[in-house]
């Protein structure tokens, strides 16, 4: 799959909710359904100012000219070895350029302390570490913050049944035990796979693993992808649980 097509599968749902990207969600969805890539799609994806700078960072570190190369896109949303090529200095400078002044001093210090501790430019790092410190999750009850983290992170779920417009999947929910993030025992959950009878995972079958973003089935995962997604998610959960 071409990189821009892979990117939109993960970007579609939060964009439809108004959380990121431009205001042309219907066009983004149509691009995904038809599988085409052109300059219009690329311009839409460059407007995702949360994700796109991470793609640029990963691409530069790997000597890849196109930030929307499929390997780079996969690294950010799911995880692969390209993440390990991003050095600490580059990640620190990227965070400094984007977020200095958007967090209180103590929060900023806590955020950048995760860089030498092993942070990677993966979506789970952005969800667990950046979001809570730059104002997007600063207010509201703890339960609301936890639910936002749960829905915003890319989850992996095993398909138990395929419905007309949804999937019943088995997923491990994010929980807060004391002040630590953990993954609880797997439970059943219903997620959406279609909008008006159309979606991105029409070939899904019972037993498949799918990636999930804001209750939407993004893609069917290979065993390698599922393992990488879990690895980098758990890695950044462990970093979150560390203190200065």
Image: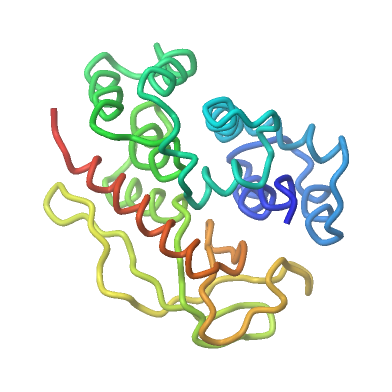
Q: Quadrant of residue 147?
A: bottom left
Instruction: Name the residue at 70% across, 32% down.
Output: 66
**With 109 as the anchor, is 201 left or right in this view?**
right
Question: Up-down: is 38 above or below 221?
Answer: above
Q: Quadrant of the N terminus?
A: bottom right
Give the image location of residue 32, x and y in percent.
78, 56
Total labels: the figure holds 0
Relative to residue 146, is residue 20 depicted above or below?
above
Q: Quadrant of residue 48?
A: top right
| Farthest residue, direction front | 63
Q: Where does residue 74 sit, x and y in percent of width and height?
A: 57, 49
Q: Is residue 238 left or right of residue 32?
A: left
- Classify residue 227 by image quadrant: bottom left
Q: Residue 35, how many percent across, how many down?
A: 83, 57
| Residue name at image x 68 percent, y 71 percent | 201
Q: Nearer the viewer, residue 30 or 95?
A: 95
Q: Residue at x 48, y 64 (%)?
A: 224
Residue drawn at (43%, 57%) of the image: 229
Residue nearest the viewer, comparing 243 with 226: 226
Direction from residue 112 to residue 62 in the image, left or right: right
Give residue 75's position: percent from left, percent from top.
52, 45
The colour mode here is: rainbow
Left-right relation of 229 to 47: left
Quarter of the image containing the C terminus? Answer: top left
């Amino acid at each position: 799959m071409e990189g821009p097509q892979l990117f939109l599968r993960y970007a579609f749902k939060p964009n439809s909710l108004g959380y990121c990207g431009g205001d042309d969600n219907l066009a983004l969805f149509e691009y995904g359904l038809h599988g085409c890539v052109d300059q219009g799609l690329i311009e839409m994806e460059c407007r995702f100012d949360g994700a796109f700078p991470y793609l640029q960072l990963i691409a530069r570190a790997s000597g890849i000219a196109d930030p929307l190369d499929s390997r780079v896109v996969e690294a950010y949303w799911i995880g692969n070895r390209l993440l390990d090529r991003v050095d600490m200095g580059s990640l620190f400078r990227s965070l400094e350029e984007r977020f200095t002044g958007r967090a209180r001093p103590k929060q900023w210090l806590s955020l950048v302390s995760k860089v030498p501790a092993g942070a990677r430019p993966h979506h789970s790092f952005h969800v667990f570490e950046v979001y809570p410190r730059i104002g997007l999750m600063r207010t509201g009850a703890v339960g609301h913050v936890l639910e936002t983290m749960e829905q915003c992170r890319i989850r992996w779920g095993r398909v138990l049944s395929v419905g007309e417009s949804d999937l019943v999947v088995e997923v491990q929910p994010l929980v807060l035990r004391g002040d630590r993030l953990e993954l609880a025992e797997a439970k059943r959950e219903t997620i959406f796979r279609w909008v008006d009878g159309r979606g991105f995972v029409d070939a899904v079958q019972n037993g498949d693993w799918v990636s999930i973003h804001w209750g939407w089935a993004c893609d069917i995962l290979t065993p390698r992808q599922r393992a990488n997604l879990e690895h980098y998610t758990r890695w950044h959960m462990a970093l979150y649980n560390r203190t200065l």
